Image (spheres, grey):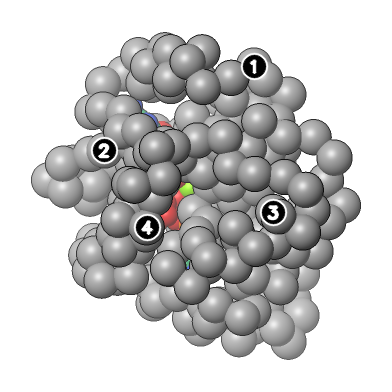
Amino acid sequence: MNIVLMGCPGAGKGTQSAKLQETFGLKHISTGDVLRAEIASGSELGQQIAQIIDKGNLVPDGLMISMLEKIVRHTDQGIIFDGFPRTVAQAQALDEMLQRFERSITCVIMITLPESEVVGRVSLRRQCRQCEEILHVEDPGETRCPKCGGELYTRPDDTPARVKHRLEVYHCETLPVKNYYVNSGKYVEVNGNQTPDQVFKDICNVLEKVK
Ligand code: AP5
Ligand code: MG
C-alpha cells in the first residue's frame, strides 16, 4: 500500500502519518522532515535548504525528487508520502519513479481544513527532538516532551507571517496537484477538522475500500 497524504500546512499530515505507520507498518516519508534532517546535519546543502524553507518557499523540484528517490530506492515496505508531491512536476516524477520501482499509488488522501484554523494550530505545535512526537501544547512556554522528557522545539516556519506565506505557496503550487489526481479515481477527501482519532477512523474507512 502506497499512500499520498495531501493537505495544507497544519492539516494533520504528520499526526495521521504517525498513526498509519503504527497501525499498518508503513514507512513514513515526510519530505519536510527529510529537509529538516539535512539542515540539522549542518551540511552545506542543509544551509542552502534552511534559507528556502525557513521563509516558507519550496525547494527546487529536481533536488526534492532526487532526495526522495534515494529513500524510495531503499524502502521495501509500503510508503506514506507526506508533503510530496507538492507541484505537478513532482506528481509526474512520482508516477514515473514508482513505475520504475514496480510500485503504484494505492490512494491519494486529501485532509481538508478551513484556513481559519491553520495559524492557531501551528502556533501551538511543538515537536520533540528526542522521540519526534508532534504535539499541540496548551502552554506556549512548555519546553519538555510529556512522553519522553526530550526538548521541545518550534519550527522556524511556524510564525503567523510565514504560515500565511506557506498557505499562498500551497494555493499556487500544490492545489493544482489535486486536479492532477482527481480524475485518477484514487483521490479521496477526509475532513481534518475533527479530533485526530476521528480523522484517523475516516482514513481507515477509506483504506478499507481500496486495499
Ligand atoms: P512540511 O513539513 O511538509 O510542512 P507543511 O506541509 O506545511 O505541513 P505541516 O508539517 O506544517 O503540517 P501537518 O499537516 O503535518 O500537520 P501536523 O500533523 O504537524 O514542509 C515544510 C517545508 O519544507 C515546506 O514549506 C517547504 O519549504 C519544504 N518542503 C517540504 N516538502 C517539499 C516538497 N515536496 N517540495 C519542495 N519543498 C518541500 O499538525 C499540526 C498541528 O495541529 C500539531 O500541533 C498537531 O498536534 C495539531 N493537530 C493535528 N491534527 C489535529 C486535529 N485533528 N485536531 C486538532 N489539532 C490537530
Ligand atoms: Mg508535517
Q: Which residue corresponds to mark 1?
A: 23
In the picture, the disc for residue 98 is 3
Q: Earlier in the sequence, mark 1 or mark 2?
A: 1
- How much space separates mark 1 and mark 4, taking CA atoms? 29 Å
Residue at position x 32%, y 46% from top?
Answer: 182
Callout 2: helix, strand or loop? Answer: strand
Q: Position of residue 161 (x, y in %)?
A: 23, 68
Q: Nearer the viewer, residue 56 or 182?
A: 182
Figure quadrant of the N terminus: top right
Q: Nearer the viewer, residue 15 or 171?
A: 171
Question: Tag 4: residue type?
Answer: Tyr
Q: Which residue corresponds to mark 4?
A: 180
Question: Tag 1: residue type?
Answer: Thr
Callout 3: helix, strand or loop? Answer: helix
Q: Which residue corresponds to mark 2?
A: 112
Q: Is residue 111 left or right of residue 206?
A: left
In the picture, the disc for residue 140 is none
- How much space separates mark 1 and mark 3, taking CA atoms? 23 Å
Q: Is residue 14 left or right of residue 129?
A: left
The quarter of the displayed image where residue 147 is located = top right
Q: Earlier in the sequence, mark 1 or mark 3?
A: 1
Would you say residue 25 is visible in this rendering? Answer: yes
Foreground label between 1 and 4: 4
Q: Position of residue 41 (x, y in %)?
A: 77, 69
Vertical arrangement, residue 5 with respect to residue 40, above or below: above
Vertical arrangement, residue 176 with respect to residue 128, above or below: below
